[in-house]
Amino acid sequence: MTDVTGAPADVLHTLFHSDQGGHEQVVLCQDRASGLKAVIALHSTALGPALGGTRFYPYANEAEAVADALNLARGMSYKNAMAGLDHGGGKAVIIGDPEQIKTEELLLAYGRFVASLGGRYVTACDVGTYVADMDVVARECRWTTGRSPENGGAGDSSVLTAFGVYQGMRASAQHLWGDPTLRGRKVGIAGVGKVGHHLVEHLRAEGAEVVVTDVREDAVGRILAAHPEGVTAVADTATLIRVEGLDIYAPCALGGALNDDTVPALTAKVVCGAANNQLAHPGVEKDLADRGILYAPDYVVNAGGVIQVADELHGFDFERCKAKAAKIYDTTLAIFARAKEDGIPPAAAADRIAEQRMHDAAAARRAR
């Protein structure tokens, strides 16, 4: 069954009728001259202009792209709310292989579409887009963050993303073991790319033992060369999650890392990592809780990057951003406390807190 546009009807059902919907606006963008096909989804502007990155990906079809934009935009509403930002949630996806079709003309066309929203959506980098791309988009759109320092931006946001995850780990240690220090703890990191390698630096500086894995041998090699002591490597994630004596598992690569196969095999007592959408499906958070594994919600602990790009809009100041990212420690502890009080998993507690903030903001706006 399709709608009047020929798109699968389940996309419109998601948008208008499901609990995963409720989006304020979805924009389909096309520029034939450059080959641009894009979707911009605004989930909520209750807290302020929607903020979220631009994903450039070779989706199997347009319906898959729309569904991804909807899901990602909704996730950004929750992330921005829990980060204490005055921003709602939005996300954009550009359809196609960036290695094949990304051009300056396409990025400029995309920038014009974002600009046409008049500031309701602020964009940034995501999978398939980089600082240099945002510099191009910014030539047509002033509501662009994640730019290079040479163009008034903050550059790579992975430094503060890793710092925020580190704060989430410290909060997890405080909640579970009564001490925030990670000295002597064994931490497994799956994915040591942009964020993961900074996370290793924090952990080693505090005296934690680190076990790493990555699909790229060169990434693992760089880590081992930089840290000849205190860091070891294993062949793959399946091996990592089964390492004996692991205290903390940090998924820092792809989403869906916590699923029906991996959760039963985990040896760690804490999961706290930088990857987005770590829970493969609803119910995994309960499976973790049933096994006594403390889960630090991903969109809470990995918010350092969005804190950084949001700050660009006010004139970037690294120390100001770092101070905001440090509060992820307190936010994570508050989530654990709420989860205990309500008798629910931490992921559900985080959702409740974020939803309350958005609800209160919307109510205040209606009352004005």
Image (cartoon, grey):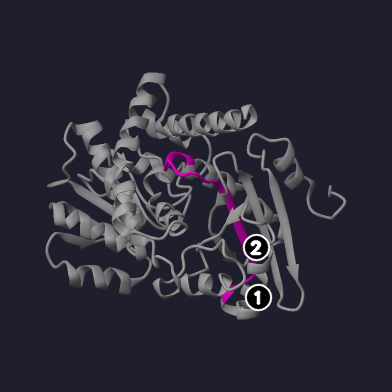
Residue type, mark 2 in image: Ala
Q: Give the answer, above or below, for where 327 lies relative to 335.
A: below
Q: Which portion, as a residue range, is magenta?
A: 81-98
Q: Residue at x 73, y 59 (%)?
A: 28
Q: Nearer the viewer, mark 2 or mark 1?
A: 2
Question: What is the secondary structure assignment of the residue under circle 1?
Answer: helix
In the displayed structure, does residue 26 sit left or right of residue 83? right
Q: Position of residue 193 (x, y in %)?
A: 35, 65
User: Residue at label 1?
Assistant: 106
Instruction: Tell me whether the residue at label 2 lies in contact with that at label 1, contact meaning CB atoms closer than 8 angstroms.
Output: no
Q: Residue at x 25, y 32 (%)?
A: 175
Q: Residue at x 56, y 62 (%)?
A: 55
In the displayed structure, does residue 78 sit left or right of residue 118? left
Local crowd at mark 1 within 10 Å, few (<14), some, or many (≥20)?
many
Q: Is residue 237 visible?
A: yes
Local crowd at mark 2 within 10 Å, few (<14), some, or many (≥20)?
many
Q: Residue at x 60, y 77 (%)?
A: 102
User: Residue at label 2?
Assistant: 115
Q: Position of residue 294 (x, y in %)?
A: 32, 35
Using the image as rendered, state which of residue 100 and residue 309 is in the foreground. 309
Q: Give the answer, above or below, for where 69 lies relative to 235.
A: above
Between the C-alphas of marks 2 and 1, the distance is 14 Å
- Dot placed on the residue nearer the N-terminal end, 2 or 1: 1
